Amino acid sequence: MAWRQPEIKRTKTVCTYCGVGCSFEMWTRDRHILKVQPVVDAPANGISTCIKGRFGWDFVNDRHRLTMPLIRENGKFREAGWDEALDLVARRLLEIRDTHGPQSIGFIGSSKASNEEAYLTQKIARAIIGTNSVDNSSRYCQNPATKGLMRTVGYGGDAGTIEDIQKAEVVVIVGSNTAECHPVIASKIKAAQKLHGQKLIVADPRKHEMADRADIFLQGRISTDLIWASALSRYMFDHDLADTEFLDQHVNQVEEYRRSLAPFTLEYAEEMTGIPCQQLIEAAEMIGRAESVCLLWAMGITQHTHGSDTSTALSNLLLVTGNYGKPGTGGYPMRGHNNVQGASDFGCLRDFYPGYESVTDDAARRRWAKGWGIDKERLSDQVGEGNFRMVQSAERGDLKAMFIIGEETAFADADTHHVHDAFTRLDFMVVQDIFLSRTAEFADVVLPACPSVEKEGTFVNTERRIQRFYEVMPPLGDSRPDWRILTDLAARMGHDWGYTHPSEIMAECASIAPLFAGVSYERLEGWNSQLWPVKADGTSTPLLYTEGFNFEDKRAVLFPLKWQPPQEAEDNEFDLMLDNGRLLEHFQANNQTGRGPRFWSQVPSWFVEVSPELASKRGIEDGTWVRLVSRRGEIEEIRALVTDRVRGNTLFLPIHQGKPGVNALTGEHHDPVVDTPAYKETAVRLEVLPRD
Ligand code: SF4
């Protein structure tokens, strides 16, 4: 009989990297990924993808994938069967709950896993353990943006779609290296510049690609964005550019807010930010006179001690100029992970059930208890701890156990020395992941999960768009989809949920959470998508606030603010500020993009960017070995890259760089409103090492 190659299989999937949510066909033969084929029907990206979505799949078949559960014994991992591992996890979690109380256990859900898996993570935490200490990596990135939007317009998500960003007359990008971190959105903006003369304003301490393409580039000092944003708001009022009709009809606290702007003169803004008055006026005039403005921001704004306030200031500016509720307008925090929006939407937050209903709201608690078939008293009415606080509690000895799914907390949390110390103090730690991550190295039990291509589910992208992804290939070895692991674990803890497919999990959530009332797998079939809030009849909401804001009286709120200095700044000993962020070719802790040679050939070694001014003062050239030292730790040696992308005494370090990583340098100071670490407020000193 003639041997024949199996047929090429084409399966729709959704990218597992950034929050743009590109979907495409994956062509496979058995486990071989032959190619990624974009299709015109893809709702977020059409035929566009970036190199990570197109080529970043070597990790799926990497030989280091976990394929068996691991149990630590005498300090070493040994392989175990699923029954033994899950029985052990169930028994230890229940013992710790019964001995130390529900608040002694914390859960971190994955912002890479599906919505259904996020939902089950928080359901185990809340309905079985009885704690609201459940969180996801948005605590490290976009929680301040969510807070800023919730304070002013009500929903913690992008106001519109990528199409709205394309439609805008003016796009403002603040603290976001969009071309490298959200490449497909950047390409849409570049196209809009060409096609309809869209204007672009970029504000950033670092001159990245979009800054080069901007009509106006505001290169201010780190941690001063609230000042220029508020000065622009004041300018609008002072120069008849505020949309007074919109403010009268739709916004509360206008006068109180206006009074709060008194200190924010252009002169003060210039002095504090270093941005010349004339540039601020040009930016204000461009924004104030435009018919439609979209404002995008990311970690350059949020990862500061006052990231929530700065996010609020940006949303205030949009309100003052009437830029909400119309096509081509609104605030757009750029979500970093493929499903960091969904992990939050589906309840992996210390203070919200799925769909952003407060855990302190008695009616919501009653409805969720009823939906889950448990007594209301089983659900805690106390706000839990986020991941940043969990680590601190573990270090104090108050938190006894952690269950971490697909997150590199040991690498991603600030001041990793503390994090590692905290993990060693836990009585019990479970990590569920596809690789033996740096975090998993601290675990007592490691459960092997599957990446998205080996399971079904849904993700939410930065637009609030829910999309299905399908199983491209079966799970590798004995690994299992997270939703199946969590369902099996719950059964061993006495809660037989009986899910046989993720669609049943989504159906349950939709039946309880009003925000997702009309979400269903049938409506999401194929290339279809839904954008929350989704009404019971399945109607999506691509553009928010067309019928008022998400407050009881439907009116937005202008939120008065004061600028406060960062908690860490340069001094004589640590005289440079360290900025940090992503590169196009890599992703987060590099656990996926670091597999195989493909992306390493693009970025063969790590580097720290040094400005030409600083380089000339210190005798640094491209390739000079340097040491970076902060109050917490050091990176012993790294090569310098001299570039005018950074200015003066600011350095830039990619966050992906290996051991010990940027968080050996960052500190525990954080935004007091949402506990997001101030990664961008890190003072360091640079020591030039002797030449090779
Ligand atoms: Fe994936 Fe983001 Fe690239 Fe799209 S832009 S292919 S979602 S990494």
Image (spheres, rainbow, N blue to C red):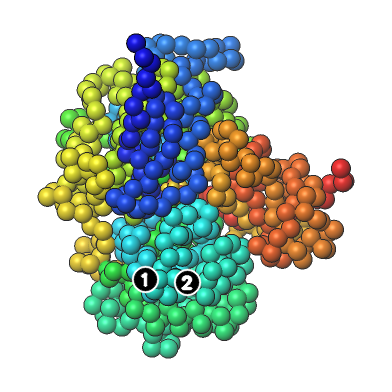
**Residue at 75% in and 64% down:** 612
Image location of residue 370, percent across then percent down: 16, 35
Q: Quadrant of the N terminus?
A: top left
Amino acid marked by disc 1? Ala
Amino acid, disc 2: Leu
Q: Secondary structure at mark 1?
A: loop
Q: Earlier in the sequence, mark 1 or mark 2?
A: 1
Determine if residue 665 is in view.
yes
**Element carrying mark 2:** strand
Q: Which residue is mark 1?
A: 168
Which percent across, then down, holds residue 76?
58, 14
From this viewpoint, which residue is outermost toward the bottom? Answer: 239
The residue where tag 2 is placed is 200
Q: CA distance from mark 1 to mark 2?
A: 10 Å
Whether 246 is drawn above or below 667: the answer is below
Around disc 2, counting alpha carbons within 10 Å, would you say few (fewer than 14), some (14 to 19), or many (20 or more)?
many
**Depicted 399 relative to depicted 581: above or below:** above
Q: Is residue 317 above or below residue 663?
A: below
- In this image, 480 relative to 442: left or right? left
Q: Look at the image and tell me whether residue 414 can be seen.
A: no
